Image (cartoon, rainbow, N blue to C red):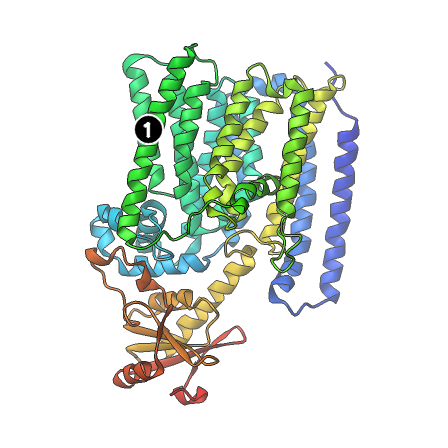
Amino acid sequence: MRKATRGFENVFFLCAAIVIFFASIAAALLHTRLHFHNDRVQYGMDHLPAALFAVFLFIALTGILRVLLTRSAYLESKSTSFYVVAIVVVFSIFWLPVLLAGGFVQDDWMLLSAASIRKIIYLHPAYSWHALDSVDGNFRPLGTVLYFAFMLKLFGVHALAFLTGNFIINLLGSVVAFLIVRELGYSRVAGATASIIYISRGLTYTENAWVSALGDAVAILLCGLTILAVLRALKQRGLAALVYHTIGWGCFCLATFAKQSSFAAPAIVAILLFLRPGDVPFVSLGRRIKSALIALLIYAGTAGIVFYHAKALLQTKTPYPLELSFDGFVSPFAYVTWYFATIEIPTKYAHAIALPIVIGLAIVIGLAIVVRHVPRALGDRPRDVIFALLAALASVGLLIPLGPRIMSYYGSMFAFWISIALGISLTRFGVVRTGNMPARIACFIFCLLVVVGFLDVRIKQAALIPSGGYIWGTFGMDRERSRYEQLSAVLSKSPHSDMLVLVDFPPEPNYYASMALLADPAIKRILVYDSGAKTYFVNDLLGYWPKDEYSVLNDAEAYSWDVSMSPSDAAKAISQEKASWIRFRDSTVEPMSRGAIGTP
């Protein structure tokens, strides 16, 4: 059997490698001649040459991978452990640089400060059932209460230790994608293809780089295990089937403690029981409908218990308003675009901001036309790919009530299921060889997806395009780290004070107040002062240090300095306690005297 050693694929990737190589040289020369006044852009240009050179090397590596893909018989003879090792290697190539260069972002500091105070969680981990996170009052005890509490206790304020957890959980999620494809009855090559495509998606950047996004990774992992257990249950009878169903439901219960994105699982399980993908025994339509409805009732009921428990703890409106609108129904198409490449339009360009949605809609229509004319893309059991696509739809369908509040990293579970569908579809065309053009095209698409994904991840890390949430690549983490170090240094040199006044800190003072709580536990009260508006802000405890008690674990506002205080009340409070004043100016944290700004 001849191997495909020449063809359009080699020409394309050779040309791409040459272009990227010279682009890295041009970026390096440009870096020596230009200086940008925007710190983020300057940071990005500083790191762009290395990022592009890494992409050049990766394209060369992809060429080697293509040679291996032409030897499918050789690959199929390899054991499962070979593929697991391959997945670990590819995952490390993509995400180890992010781990090693990572740091904390804004939400992380608030969660760290809460963990430093809530020491009661160490003694009573079950109390996390009654705790809300300190960012916006979400109920996520696994990822934002227990994880931060015990990691801070064991490792202190060391981001590398925290992000190692993200690395491991996301890696396990990638392995679960491989196992799901295998459980559906497909080859190891198909499973590895799905896993590697998922690994390469820039949609998952935030959950790999942002410690407080660990909940997303945990939800994907546990929901994946839920589906894996239910798939195994469909092949069993009697007690064995019941055991697997119970394991699946148990994984889902834990997933609801990690992130609300897990609430898509009830619909996914119902779809699974109705379509019965994989090589499973045939059952009648009536029985499939009955099983799907029972599962939907059980899983949705479980999610409902967690949802209403969280609302009871919050005692106010939900952190994110839920409503049905036109924007909500069309916005999921943007995730289709973001799955392939990140396209972010600044909000000031109102007419172009819908571009990702339009492109996503065009991609969906185009793929539907391709599948209609190339039915082999769905394989011998179309319901398998259809199940994965419907699971992806359920994942983004959960986001419809959020309306225009969409961000690319919300689509990480969507990326998980789309990758499984693609992994199955792209390996349905047989051996990659010169005479098999459909297989060559499928292999080319796979390699192109992986290369574009690697470029997306490296450019995001360089902070030239937004990564999602509060992350502008490693730049944002370096900036937060620098501010914390400056604040710690200033506080360590100042005389002991019971009160701290933060002057003219950036628009989100919550994070800097949280940094102060971590940097100096001796401070008992914090006020934030805006010299332009001549306004003070405190938390709902009048600026006082939150308490470490069971009864206040659900008080998220205790860590948010967004309650206004009158100048007279603030002046009275400051006069009664020994206060230190710290000002933020030109990215520098510095001590100051009260009289320097003429406060009342």
From the viewer's perspective, is 17 left or right of 227? right
Which residue is depicted at the point 57% across and 44% down? 202
Q: Height in image: 591 above or below 85? A: below
Q: Height in image: 309 above or below 272? A: below
Q: In x, y percent, where is residue 584?
A: 47, 76
Q: Amino acid at mark 1?
A: Leu
Report whether residue 65 is seen: no
- How many residues crowd around disc 1 within 10 Å: few (fewer than 14), some, or many (20 or more)? some
Q: Nearer the viewer, residue 436 or 379?
A: 379
In terms of image quadrants, where is residue 425?
Answer: top right
Which residue is depicted at the point 39% across and 43% down? 260
Q: Height in image: 104 above or below 17? A: below
Q: Height in image: 48 above or below 324? A: below
Residue highlighted by disc 1: 297
Q: In x, y percent, where is residue 46?
A: 65, 60
Q: Secondary structure at mark 1?
A: helix
Q: Nearer the viewer, residue 433 or 205?
A: 205
Q: In x, y percent, where is residue 333?
A: 58, 40
Report whether residue 59 is seen: yes
Which residue is depicted at the point 62% across and 19% down? 428
Q: In x, y percent, where is residue 140?
A: 34, 47
